[in-house]
Amino acid sequence: MILLAPPPALALPAIVASADDQTRTRFLEFFAVTIRNPHTRRAYMRAAGNFLAWVAARGVSSLAAVQPLHVAGWVAALAHEMSAPSVKQ
């Protein structure tokens, strides 16, 4: 059996690491199964980690607590730091 575990450079975000086994597995499966290109997988995992760190810094302590307004706030924050094509990524 192959275990799905991220390489050390792709450690699970704290919010995911503190979740239950099923949530951690589904998070990893999403990246392993739906994103075939390893470079894209790393980039998306990094972006997800950045987003989850951003919401955690604002008091969100679980994936279930993440709301659409958090996503909108993060996108707005990125728009002040990055070009439009980078934000759309």
Image (spheres, rainbow, N blue to C red):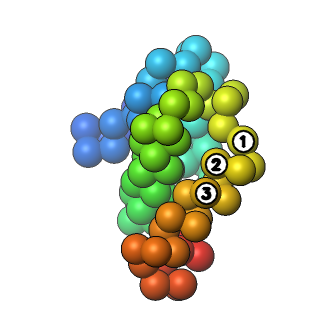
User: What residue lies at 59% left-to-right and 76% top-to-bottom?
Assistant: 88
Q: Is residue 48 above or below residue 66?
A: below
Task: State the CA–CA distance, disc 3 to disc 2.
Answer: 5 Å
Q: Is residue 28 left or right of residue 68?
A: left
Quarter of image, res 66: top right
Which residue is under mark 3? 73
* SS assignment at label 2: helix
**Is the residue marked by circle 3 packed among few (<14), some (14-19), or many (20+) residues within 10 Å?**
few
Which quadrant, please, contains the C terminus? bottom right
Q: Is residue 18 above or below residue 27?
A: above
**Is the residue marked by circle 1 packed among few (<14), some (14-19), or many (20+) residues within 10 Å?**
few
Residue 19 seen anywhere in this rendered image of the structure: yes
* Amino acid type of the residue tagged 2 in the rendering: His
Residue 36 seen anywhere in this rendered image of the structure: no
* Amino acid type of the residue tagged 1 in the rendering: Gln
Task: State the CA–CA distance, disc 1 to disc 2.
Answer: 5 Å
Task: State the CA–CA distance, disc 1 to disc 3.
Answer: 10 Å
Which residue is under mark 2? 70
Which residue is under mark 1? 67
Closest to the observer, 69 or 42? 69
User: What residue lies at 58% left-to-right and 67% top-to-bottom?
Assistant: 76
